[in-house]
Image (cartoon, grey):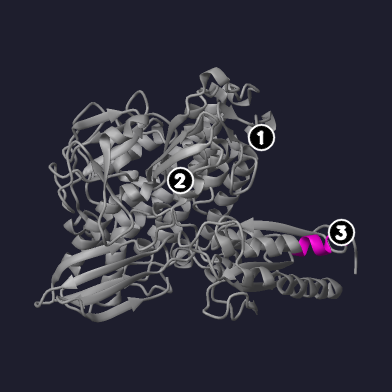
Amino acid sequence: MKASRLSETVIIGMGNRLLSDDGVGIAVACAVAECINQRVKLTVKELPSGGIRLMEAMIGFKRAVVVDAMLSGVTPGTVQRFDPKQFVTTKNTFSSHDTDFATAYDLGVMAAVPLPEQVSFWGIEAGEFDLFGERFTDEVAAALPEAVSRIVAEIMEWEEAA
Amino acid sequence: MARITIDPITRLEGHGRIDIFLNDQGTVENTFFQIPELRGFEQFCVGRMAEEMPAITNRICGVCPEAHHLAATKALDRVFGAEPTPTAKKLRELLYMAFFVTDHTTHFYALGGPDFIVGPDAPPSERNILGVARKVGLEVAGEVIACRKRNHEIITFLGGKSIHPVAGVPGGWSRPITEEERSQIEDAARKNIEFARFSLSIFEKIVLKNPVYLDLVTSDIYLHRTYSMGTVDANNQVNFYDGMIRVVDPEGNEFVRYDPSEYREHIAERVEAWTYLKYPYLKKVGWKGLTDGIDSGIYTATPLSRLNVSEGMATPLANAEYQRLYETFGCKKITAARYEPIHHRLATHWARLIELLYASERMLELALDPEITSQDTRNIPAPARFVGEGVGSIEAPRGTLTHHFVTDDRGVLTMVNMIVGTTNNYAPISMSIKRAAEKLITSDAPDESILNRVEMAFRLYDPCLSCATHFLPGKMPLTVAIRDSQGGMLREMRRKG
C-alpha cells in the first residue's frame, strides 16, 4: 500500500447534524477518517442533500463511499451496504430540488466529468429523524462501531488493490 | 363524489399531500394541499445565543442555506444595532447572486424545464435533466455542471465554507476578497451572463415558438389574480438582497410599500386544522378563503410576482427580456417602466430565467465595483447600540424570506419567527392545484399526463416544503388520492420522478 499520496478516496457523510439520527452518516464519515488517517489519505465531505450535488462531490476521485441514514422499515441501527447497481435511495441521497443520484450520475457521465470507478453506499437505519436534537437514539449510537469498522475494511481493501 | 390524492412529488423538498374530492358527476368538488409535518425549528432556537443563528438556520434546508444565512445575518445587524459597511453589503449580495445563478439554473434544467422541453406527456422516467440534455444537446449537461461548479467555488471562498456559509456576522462580513478572487468572480459572471442568455434562447425556441406550449402558458388553467409581493430598491426595481417590501394589487396598483421590520402590521397568518402550514395573507385586505381577486388578501411571492412589482429590471439585458415578457402577454404599461401584472402562473418559469440573467449581470456589476476588494468589511457592534430585536428579510429564490429574532439583554433568544418563501405561496399553490384539477380532471381515472399537469401547477412555484414547515432535508413524498364525496378512497397514486 502506498502511503501519504494525494487523496483518491472520498467519504461523503450525508444528513443533518441537528436532526437526531439523520446526522449518523456524517458522524460515521468523520469516525472512519479519524480511524485510518494515518494509513490512508481520505477526503471527508458533509452533504445535507443529494442529487446533482452528490455526484459533484465525487468528481475527481477514484473511489467514493457514501454514508447516510436510511428509512427502510428494518430495525433501527441496522447497517446495510448497497452496490450502485442495486442502490435506489437512502434518506438524503435524493434531492427533490433536482433529481436522484442515479440520474445525477448519468448526467455526469453524459458531461464526461471524471467520476469514481468504485462507489459504495452505506445506510444506517434511523430510529428518530422528526425531532431536532444533537444526539442519536441508543440503537443508532450502538451501530456506529460496526458501520465504521465495515467501511474501514472496505476502504483498506480498495487501497490494497490500488 | 370522488377524491384524488397526488403523492408523486419526487421533485419537491418537504412533505405534502394533495387530496382531490370529486362529486357524483366525476368532476372536481374541492382540493386540499396538506402539509402534515411540523418540526418547530423556531422553538429549537429559543435559548441559544443570537449570534449562532446564521450557522444554525442555514441547516433548515439543504437547498437554500445561503438565503437563511443572509436573512439571519441581517436580523443580527439589527439585534446588535450594527450597520454593515458598504463593502460588507456588496460581498453579501455578491455571494447571493452566485447562489441565485446556481439555484435558478438547477430549477430550469432539472425541475421546471423538463415539463416543457421534454413535454408534459412524456413518461416521468424521461421527464428529467437527462431528457432535457437529449432534447437540447448533450453539451448542455456539461454547461449546467460547469455553471454550478464555478458559482459554488465562489460561494465557498466568499462564504468561508462549502454549502453552509459562515462569513456573515452582525455588522459585516468576516472575509474580504483579494484581487485574484475578484478577477475569478468577474470571469464567472461573464460566463453566467452568456449561459443565462443561452437558457432564455432555449425557452424561446422550445416553448414560445411552440403554439401548443404557448397556449398552455397563456391558458386560464394556470391563471390566478392575486396580489404580488417582492423586495424593491430605491428605484422600485427588484432587488434580491435588500430594500422595501412592495405589494401591488391584481390590477398593478401599489397597495403598500413597507420596511421588512413592519411585516407584522401587514401580514397575518391563517391557521387551518387540517394542515400544519399556515396561510399568510394581507392583514388590511383580510382572509376570504382560498379565493383570488382584489378583495382577497392572498398574495404571491415568486419570481413572477417580483417582476410584477418592479419598475423594470435594474440591469440592461434583463430589462430587455422583462419588456419582452410583458409585451408577449399583451400587458399595457401602467407606469413609465412597469406593466400590468401577469397572472398566468406558468410564466413564472420565464420570469425565473429573467432573474437568472439579472443575477448574472448584477454579479458582474459587483465584481467590477472598486469597493469590492476593500478590507473594510465590518463595523464591530457597540454594546451601547444593542437593540435585542431584529428582522432580516431577503428574497429567496422561492419568495420573500423573513427572520425575526427577539433576545434578552444578554443576547439569548427568547422568540424566533420565520416566514419562508414557500409559506407565502401556500394559498396560491393550493388555488393553482384546484384550478388545474378542475380544468383537467373530468373523471376519477386521470391519466399520467393529466396528473403531471396538476403537478405542474405547484412545481412552477418551486416550493420547498422542507423550509415551509421548517422541515429538514430529505426525500419527501406527496400523495395524490381520489376520494368520493364521503371521503372513501377510490384511488391513491405515488410515483417516482
Asked if marks 2 and 1 fall on the same chain, the answer is: yes
Q: Which residue is mark 3?
A: A5
Q: Is residue B85 covered in magenta?
A: no
Q: Is residue B463 left or right of residue B2?
A: right
Helix, strand or loop under label 1: helix
Q: Is residue B19 left or right of residue B459?
A: left
Residue A85 locus on image (x, y percent): 61, 80
Q: Is residue B478 left or right of residue A159?
A: left
Residue A41 locus on image (x, y percent): 82, 60
Start-end of magenta stretch: A32-38
- B31 w.r.t. A153: above or below: above
First-in-chain label (2 vs 1): 1
- B412 w.r.t. A51: above or below: above
Helix, strand or loop under label 3: loop
Residue positioned 23% across, 44% down in the render: B342
For this rendering, which residue is in front, A161 or A90?
A90
Q: Residue furthest right?
A: A2
Q: Chain of mark 2?
A: B
Q: Is residue B462 left or right of residue A122?
A: left
* Location of residue B207 (image quadrant): bottom left
Q: CA distance from mark 2 to mark 1?
A: 22 Å
Residue B43 locus on image (x, y percent): 46, 48
Q: Which residue is mark 1?
A: B181
For this rendering, which residue is in front, B366 or A27?
A27
Q: Residue furthest top?
A: B384
Q: Sort mark 3 into few (<14), some (14-19) or many (20+) by Cα contacts within 10 Å.
A: few
For this rendering, which residue is in front, B255 or B36?
B36
Q: Is residue A37 covered in magenta?
A: yes
Q: Sort mark 1 into few (<14), some (14-19) or many (20+) by Cα contacts within 10 Å.
A: some
Mark 1: amino acid: Glu
Residue B277 visible in rendering: yes
